[in-house]
Amino acid sequence: MVRTKITSKGQTTIPSVFRKKWKTSQIIWEINPDGSAIVRPVPDVMDLFGAAGSPQPKDRDEREQAHDAIAEDAEARPATR
């Protein structure tokens, strides 16, 4: 268990032990009915690449091409904020 402080702006630091283990830049906060919270890392979608498996031979550059296509799509979309 690690304790952190909440700043006057409502921010807190995610301890490095969690950042190193999770290797993500986003987290999800879930509030329970009793008022407690669960904090979870948002998995990188690319970590799931190939998880379903396929009998077809794998292209060595396929993962990089998919990552580039996702990045290009994200850049083409207007910001929603």
Image (tube, rainbow, N blue to C red):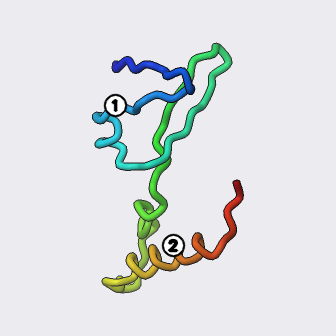
According to the picture, the residue beneath numbered tag 1 turns out to be: 15
* Front residue of this view, candidates 37 and 50: 37
What element does badge 2 sit on? helix
Q: Residue furthest front?
A: 8
Residue at horizontal 31%, vertical 83%?
60
Q: Is residue 66 left or right of residue 79?
A: left
What element does badge 1 sit on? loop
Indicate the quadrant where residue 46 lies. Answer: bottom left
Q: Is residue 76 left or right of residue 43?
A: right
Residue 48 is situated, as x and y percent measured from the top left of the image, at 44, 61
Q: Quadrant of the N terminus?
A: top left
Count neighbours of disc 2 (C-alpha within 10 A) and say few if under 14, some if 14 to 19, many if 20 or more. few
Q: Is residue 35 left or right of residue 66?
A: right
Indicate the quadrant where residue 53 lies. Answer: bottom left
The amino acid type found where label 1 is placed reads Pro
Residue at horizontal 46%, vertical 67%?
52
* Front residue of this view, candidates 70 and 75: 75
Residue at horizontal 56%, vertical 25%?
10
Residue at horizontal 67%, vertical 62%?
79
According to the picture, the residue beneath numbered tag 2 turns out to be: 71
Q: Quadrant of the C terminus?
A: bottom right
Instruction: First in sequence, mark 2 or 1: give its number.
Output: 1
Residue 5 is situated, as x and y percent measured from the top left of the image, at 43, 19
The amino acid type found where label 2 is placed reads Ala
Q: Is residue 81 above or below residue 40?
A: below
* Front residue of this view, candidates 22 and 12: 12
